[in-house]
Image (cartoon, rainbow, N blue to C red):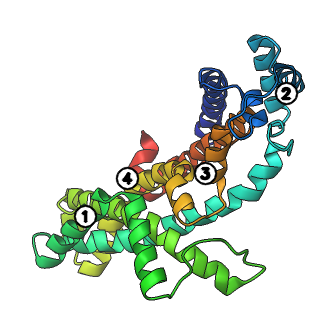
Protein backbone atom coordinates (compact mmCIF):
# COMPACT_ATOMS: atom_id res chain seq x y z
CA UNK A 1 0.00 0.00 0.00
CA UNK A 2 2.86 2.40 0.83
CA UNK A 3 4.49 1.84 -2.55
CA UNK A 4 1.16 2.42 -4.25
CA UNK A 5 0.65 5.74 -2.43
CA UNK A 6 4.19 6.90 -3.24
CA UNK A 7 3.65 6.04 -6.89
CA UNK A 8 0.39 7.94 -6.97
CA UNK A 9 2.00 10.96 -5.30
CA UNK A 10 4.74 10.98 -7.92
CA UNK A 11 2.12 10.80 -10.64
CA UNK A 12 0.24 13.64 -8.93
CA UNK A 13 3.33 15.86 -9.08
CA UNK A 14 3.70 15.18 -12.79
CA UNK A 15 0.03 15.99 -13.37
CA UNK A 16 0.35 19.24 -11.42
CA UNK A 17 3.34 20.21 -13.53
CA UNK A 18 1.36 19.51 -16.71
CA UNK A 19 -1.61 21.51 -15.42
CA UNK A 20 0.64 24.42 -14.44
CA UNK A 21 2.30 24.44 -17.85
CA UNK A 22 -0.94 24.18 -19.81
CA UNK A 23 -2.73 26.94 -17.89
CA UNK A 24 0.31 29.24 -18.17
CA UNK A 25 0.52 29.06 -21.94
CA UNK A 26 -3.24 28.99 -22.51
CA UNK A 27 -3.61 32.35 -20.76
CA UNK A 28 -1.38 33.95 -23.38
CA UNK A 29 -3.83 32.79 -26.05
CA UNK A 30 -6.77 34.55 -24.37
CA UNK A 31 -7.50 37.88 -26.09
CA UNK A 32 -6.95 40.99 -24.01
CA UNK A 33 -3.95 42.67 -22.41
CA UNK A 34 -4.14 42.69 -18.57
CA UNK A 35 -2.47 46.12 -18.44
CA UNK A 36 -4.94 47.62 -20.90
CA UNK A 37 -7.93 46.11 -19.11
CA UNK A 38 -6.80 47.35 -15.69
CA UNK A 39 -6.16 50.87 -16.94
CA UNK A 40 -9.26 51.17 -19.09
CA UNK A 41 -12.06 53.23 -17.58
CA UNK A 42 -15.42 54.03 -19.11
CA UNK A 43 -14.42 52.54 -22.45
CA UNK A 44 -11.56 55.09 -22.87
CA UNK A 45 -8.27 53.63 -24.10
CA UNK A 46 -5.39 54.28 -21.66
CA UNK A 47 -2.21 56.14 -22.77
CA UNK A 48 0.38 53.80 -24.34
CA UNK A 49 3.05 55.05 -21.92
CA UNK A 50 0.97 53.99 -18.92
CA UNK A 51 0.31 50.58 -20.47
CA UNK A 52 4.02 50.04 -21.12
CA UNK A 53 4.94 51.03 -17.57
CA UNK A 54 2.30 48.74 -16.04
CA UNK A 55 3.40 45.82 -18.21
CA UNK A 56 6.94 46.32 -16.93
CA UNK A 57 5.73 46.38 -13.32
CA UNK A 58 3.79 43.14 -13.87
CA UNK A 59 6.70 41.49 -15.69
CA UNK A 60 4.71 41.02 -18.89
CA UNK A 61 7.34 42.76 -21.01
CA UNK A 62 9.80 39.87 -20.56
CA UNK A 63 10.03 36.95 -23.02
CA UNK A 64 7.46 34.19 -22.46
CA UNK A 65 10.16 31.61 -21.66
CA UNK A 66 11.62 33.89 -18.99
CA UNK A 67 8.18 34.38 -17.46
CA UNK A 68 7.57 30.63 -17.54
CA UNK A 69 10.82 29.82 -15.72
CA UNK A 70 10.09 32.48 -13.09
CA UNK A 71 6.55 31.11 -12.75
CA UNK A 72 7.78 27.55 -12.10
CA UNK A 73 10.37 28.84 -9.64
CA UNK A 74 7.66 30.66 -7.67
CA UNK A 75 5.47 27.56 -7.58
CA UNK A 76 8.37 25.41 -6.39
CA UNK A 77 8.81 27.80 -3.45
CA UNK A 78 5.09 27.85 -2.65
CA UNK A 79 4.58 31.36 -4.04
CA UNK A 80 1.59 31.84 -6.34
CA UNK A 81 2.41 35.47 -7.03
CA UNK A 82 0.37 38.60 -6.40
CA UNK A 83 -2.89 39.73 -7.94
CA UNK A 84 -2.65 42.15 -10.84
CA UNK A 85 -5.70 43.98 -9.52
CA UNK A 86 -4.70 44.93 -5.97
CA UNK A 87 -1.28 43.26 -5.47
CA UNK A 88 -2.69 40.98 -2.76
CA UNK A 89 -0.79 37.66 -2.48
CA UNK A 90 -2.78 35.00 -4.33
CA UNK A 91 -2.17 32.47 -1.55
CA UNK A 92 -3.88 34.84 0.90
CA UNK A 93 -6.90 35.35 -1.36
CA UNK A 94 -7.25 31.60 -1.94
CA UNK A 95 -6.82 30.89 1.78
CA UNK A 96 -9.71 33.27 2.50
CA UNK A 97 -12.07 31.89 -0.14
CA UNK A 98 -11.21 28.19 -0.40
CA UNK A 99 -12.74 27.16 2.98
CA UNK A 100 -16.09 28.60 1.86
CA UNK A 101 -16.11 26.57 -1.35
CA UNK A 102 -14.95 23.44 0.50
CA UNK A 103 -17.68 23.93 3.08
CA UNK A 104 -20.30 24.21 0.37
CA UNK A 105 -19.05 21.19 -1.57
CA UNK A 106 -18.42 19.13 1.58
CA UNK A 107 -21.90 19.75 2.95
CA UNK A 108 -23.46 18.84 -0.40
CA UNK A 109 -21.34 15.68 -0.70
CA UNK A 110 -22.13 14.55 2.84
CA UNK A 111 -25.85 15.09 2.32
CA UNK A 112 -25.75 13.28 -1.03
CA UNK A 113 -23.97 10.23 0.37
CA UNK A 114 -26.18 10.00 3.47
CA UNK A 115 -29.32 10.20 1.35
CA UNK A 116 -28.23 8.66 -1.97
CA UNK A 117 -26.76 5.36 -0.74
CA UNK A 118 -29.73 4.29 1.43
CA UNK A 119 -32.20 5.28 -1.30
CA UNK A 120 -30.13 3.41 -3.87
CA UNK A 121 -30.21 0.27 -1.72
CA UNK A 122 -33.97 0.63 -1.24
CA UNK A 123 -34.44 1.09 -4.97
CA UNK A 124 -32.42 -2.07 -5.68
CA UNK A 125 -34.27 -4.13 -3.07
CA UNK A 126 -37.64 -2.98 -4.42
CA UNK A 127 -36.65 -3.23 -8.08
CA UNK A 128 -39.65 -2.89 -10.37
CA UNK A 129 -41.96 -1.83 -7.55
CA UNK A 130 -43.37 1.67 -7.04
CA UNK A 131 -40.50 2.98 -4.83
CA UNK A 132 -38.00 2.00 -7.51
CA UNK A 133 -40.05 3.56 -10.30
CA UNK A 134 -40.64 6.75 -8.31
CA UNK A 135 -36.95 7.16 -7.49
CA UNK A 136 -35.92 6.56 -11.11
CA UNK A 137 -38.43 9.18 -12.22
CA UNK A 138 -37.27 11.74 -9.64
CA UNK A 139 -33.57 11.22 -10.33
CA UNK A 140 -34.18 11.54 -14.05
CA UNK A 141 -35.76 14.94 -13.50
CA UNK A 142 -33.03 16.05 -11.09
CA UNK A 143 -30.24 15.14 -13.51
CA UNK A 144 -31.90 16.83 -16.47
CA UNK A 145 -32.56 20.22 -14.83
CA UNK A 146 -29.61 22.68 -14.91
CA UNK A 147 -28.17 23.63 -11.56
CA UNK A 148 -28.91 27.35 -11.98
CA UNK A 149 -32.59 26.51 -12.60
CA UNK A 150 -32.71 24.42 -9.42
CA UNK A 151 -31.07 27.24 -7.47
CA UNK A 152 -33.45 29.84 -8.84
CA UNK A 153 -36.53 27.71 -8.07
CA UNK A 154 -35.34 27.00 -4.51
CA UNK A 155 -34.62 30.68 -3.97
CA UNK A 156 -38.05 31.67 -5.31
CA UNK A 157 -39.88 29.09 -3.20
CA UNK A 158 -38.04 29.20 0.13
CA UNK A 159 -36.84 32.81 0.11
CA UNK A 160 -39.36 34.89 -1.83
CA UNK A 161 -42.59 32.98 -1.24
CA UNK A 162 -42.12 31.24 2.13
CA UNK A 163 -39.44 33.57 3.50
CA UNK A 164 -37.72 30.79 5.42
CA UNK A 165 -34.15 31.40 4.24
CA UNK A 166 -32.16 34.37 2.92
CA UNK A 167 -31.98 34.70 -0.86
CA UNK A 168 -28.21 34.87 -0.84
CA UNK A 169 -25.19 36.38 0.78
CA UNK A 170 -22.77 35.05 3.37
CA UNK A 171 -22.32 35.38 7.11
CA UNK A 172 -19.38 33.81 8.92
CA UNK A 173 -20.09 31.14 11.52
CA UNK A 174 -18.32 33.15 14.19
CA UNK A 175 -20.42 36.20 13.47
CA UNK A 176 -23.78 34.42 13.48
CA UNK A 177 -24.03 30.60 13.48
CA UNK A 178 -27.75 30.63 12.72
CA UNK A 179 -27.40 33.08 9.85
CA UNK A 180 -24.45 31.10 8.50
CA UNK A 181 -26.38 27.82 8.44
CA UNK A 182 -29.39 29.52 6.86
CA UNK A 183 -27.27 30.98 4.06
CA UNK A 184 -25.55 27.61 3.56
CA UNK A 185 -28.67 25.48 3.22
CA UNK A 186 -30.09 26.55 -0.15
CA UNK A 187 -26.81 26.43 -2.14
CA UNK A 188 -26.05 23.08 -0.50
CA UNK A 189 -29.42 21.69 -1.60
CA UNK A 190 -28.90 23.08 -5.10
CA UNK A 191 -25.70 21.09 -5.50
CA UNK A 192 -26.88 18.04 -3.56
CA UNK A 193 -30.01 17.38 -5.64
CA UNK A 194 -28.08 16.37 -8.76
CA UNK A 195 -25.24 14.79 -6.77
CA UNK A 196 -27.67 12.66 -4.74
CA UNK A 197 -29.27 11.42 -7.96
CA UNK A 198 -25.90 10.23 -9.29
CA UNK A 199 -24.97 8.51 -6.03
CA UNK A 200 -28.41 6.88 -5.85
CA UNK A 201 -28.20 5.51 -9.39
CA UNK A 202 -24.65 4.24 -8.90
CA UNK A 203 -25.58 2.57 -5.58
CA UNK A 204 -28.62 0.93 -7.18
CA UNK A 205 -26.58 -0.33 -10.13
CA UNK A 206 -23.75 -1.78 -8.03
CA UNK A 207 -26.15 -3.43 -5.56
CA UNK A 208 -28.00 -5.10 -8.44
CA UNK A 209 -24.64 -6.29 -9.77
CA UNK A 210 -23.75 -7.93 -6.45
CA UNK A 211 -27.09 -9.23 -5.26
CA UNK A 212 -26.93 -12.46 -7.30
CA UNK A 213 -23.26 -13.31 -6.72
CA UNK A 214 -22.23 -16.74 -5.43
CA UNK A 215 -20.98 -15.48 -2.08
CA UNK A 216 -24.37 -13.90 -1.39
CA UNK A 217 -26.16 -17.18 -2.01
CA UNK A 218 -23.56 -18.92 0.16
CA UNK A 219 -24.16 -16.47 3.00
CA UNK A 220 -27.88 -17.13 2.84
CA UNK A 221 -27.26 -20.90 2.73
CA UNK A 222 -25.23 -20.61 5.96
CA UNK A 223 -28.32 -19.32 7.69
CA UNK A 224 -27.36 -15.65 8.06
CA UNK A 225 -30.27 -13.32 8.53
CA UNK A 226 -31.28 -11.23 5.55
CA UNK A 227 -30.21 -8.09 7.37
CA UNK A 228 -26.68 -9.42 7.90
CA UNK A 229 -26.48 -10.63 4.30
CA UNK A 230 -27.33 -7.16 3.04
CA UNK A 231 -25.08 -5.31 5.46
CA UNK A 232 -21.98 -7.54 5.33
CA UNK A 233 -22.05 -9.02 1.84
CA UNK A 234 -24.14 -6.88 -0.48
CA UNK A 235 -23.91 -3.25 0.63
CA UNK A 236 -20.25 -3.35 1.66
CA UNK A 237 -19.16 -4.98 -1.60
CA UNK A 238 -21.19 -2.42 -3.54
CA UNK A 239 -19.66 0.71 -2.03
CA UNK A 240 -16.37 0.70 -3.97
CA UNK A 241 -17.70 2.22 -7.21
CA UNK A 242 -19.84 4.64 -5.19
CA UNK A 243 -16.75 5.89 -3.33
CA UNK A 244 -14.89 6.32 -6.63
CA UNK A 245 -17.80 8.24 -8.14
CA UNK A 246 -18.09 10.43 -5.05
CA UNK A 247 -14.39 11.26 -5.14
CA UNK A 248 -14.47 12.17 -8.80
CA UNK A 249 -17.60 14.25 -8.39
CA UNK A 250 -16.31 16.13 -5.34
CA UNK A 251 -13.19 17.06 -7.26
CA UNK A 252 -15.30 18.30 -10.14
CA UNK A 253 -17.63 20.24 -7.86
CA UNK A 254 -14.78 22.23 -6.31
CA UNK A 255 -14.18 23.91 -9.65
CA UNK A 256 -17.75 23.64 -10.88
CA UNK A 257 -19.71 25.62 -8.31
CA UNK A 258 -19.44 28.83 -10.34
CA UNK A 259 -23.15 29.13 -11.13
CA UNK A 260 -24.25 28.19 -7.62
CA UNK A 261 -21.92 30.70 -6.00
CA UNK A 262 -23.05 33.33 -8.49
CA UNK A 263 -26.78 32.69 -7.97
CA UNK A 264 -26.51 32.79 -4.17
CA UNK A 265 -23.74 35.41 -3.99
CA UNK A 266 -21.53 32.95 -2.12
CA UNK A 267 -17.96 34.37 -1.83
CA UNK A 268 -16.08 31.22 -2.75
CA UNK A 269 -13.24 30.25 -5.03
CA UNK A 270 -15.28 29.91 -8.22
CA UNK A 271 -16.52 33.49 -8.06
CA UNK A 272 -12.93 34.65 -7.64
CA UNK A 273 -11.92 32.67 -10.73
CA UNK A 274 -14.61 34.32 -12.88
CA UNK A 275 -13.50 37.80 -11.82
CA UNK A 276 -9.84 36.92 -12.40
CA UNK A 277 -10.58 35.71 -15.94
CA UNK A 278 -12.56 38.88 -16.69
CA UNK A 279 -9.59 41.06 -15.72
CA UNK A 280 -6.97 38.69 -17.18
CA UNK A 281 -5.44 38.40 -13.72
CA UNK A 282 -2.94 35.69 -14.63
CA UNK A 283 -1.59 34.94 -11.12
CA UNK A 284 -5.08 34.48 -9.66
CA UNK A 285 -6.25 32.26 -12.54
CA UNK A 286 -3.11 30.14 -12.35
CA UNK A 287 -3.31 29.89 -8.57
CA UNK A 288 -6.96 28.86 -8.49
CA UNK A 289 -6.53 26.27 -11.24
CA UNK A 290 -3.49 24.76 -9.53
CA UNK A 291 -5.22 24.56 -6.14
CA UNK A 292 -8.36 23.00 -7.66
CA UNK A 293 -6.24 20.49 -9.60
CA UNK A 294 -4.28 19.59 -6.46
CA UNK A 295 -7.48 19.06 -4.48
CA UNK A 296 -8.98 16.98 -7.29
CA UNK A 297 -5.92 14.72 -7.35
CA UNK A 298 -5.80 14.47 -3.54
CA UNK A 299 -9.48 13.55 -3.24
CA UNK A 300 -9.14 10.85 -5.88
CA UNK A 301 -6.04 9.49 -4.15
CA UNK A 302 -8.02 9.20 -0.90
CA UNK A 303 -10.84 7.47 -2.78
CA UNK A 304 -8.38 4.99 -4.31
CA UNK A 305 -6.97 4.21 -0.87
CA UNK A 306 -10.43 3.68 0.64
CA UNK A 307 -11.57 1.41 -2.21
CA UNK A 308 -9.41 -1.63 -1.23
CA UNK A 309 -10.56 -1.26 2.39
CA UNK A 310 -14.20 -1.57 1.33
CA UNK A 311 -13.57 -4.25 -1.30
CA UNK A 312 -10.84 -6.75 -0.30
CA UNK A 313 -10.80 -8.13 -3.86
CA UNK A 314 -9.12 -4.94 -5.04
CA UNK A 315 -6.09 -5.49 -2.80
CA UNK A 316 -4.77 -8.30 -4.96
CA UNK A 317 -5.00 -6.29 -8.18
Q: How far is the residue under mark 3 from the one under mark 2?
A: 24 Å
Is 188 on the left-hand or right-hand side of 143?
Answer: right
Q: Secondary structure at mark 2?
A: helix
Q: Which residue is mark 3?
A: 270
Q: Secondary structure at mark 4?
A: helix
Q: Nearer the viewer, residue 7 or 315?
A: 7
The image shows residue 56 at horizontal and vertical percentages of 88, 21
Q: Which is more N-terminal, label 1 or label 4?
A: 1
- Looking at the rendered image, the disc whose residue lies closer to the viewer, 1 or 2, is 2
Instruction: Tell me, yes or no, if residue 192 can be seen here.
Output: no
Camera-side mark, 4 or 2: 2
User: Are there few (<14), some (14-19), or many (20+) residues within 10 Å of tag 2?
Assistant: some
Residue denoted by label 4 = 241
Q: Which residue is mark 1?
A: 141
Measure the C-alpha gap from mark 4 to mark 2: 47 Å
Lower sequence index among marks 4 and 2: 2
Q: Residue 154's x, y, as percent?
A: 42, 74
Q: Quadrant of residue 16?
A: top right
Residue 65 visible, this angle: yes
Amino acid sequence: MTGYIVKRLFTALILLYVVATVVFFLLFLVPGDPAVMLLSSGGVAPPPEAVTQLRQEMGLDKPVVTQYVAYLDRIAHGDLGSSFQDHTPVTQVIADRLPRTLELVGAAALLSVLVGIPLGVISARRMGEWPDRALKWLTGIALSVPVFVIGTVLMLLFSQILGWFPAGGYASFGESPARHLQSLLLPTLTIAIGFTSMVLRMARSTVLGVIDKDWVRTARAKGLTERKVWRRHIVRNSLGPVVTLTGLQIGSLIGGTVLVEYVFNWPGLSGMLVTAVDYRDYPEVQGVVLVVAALFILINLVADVIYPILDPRARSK
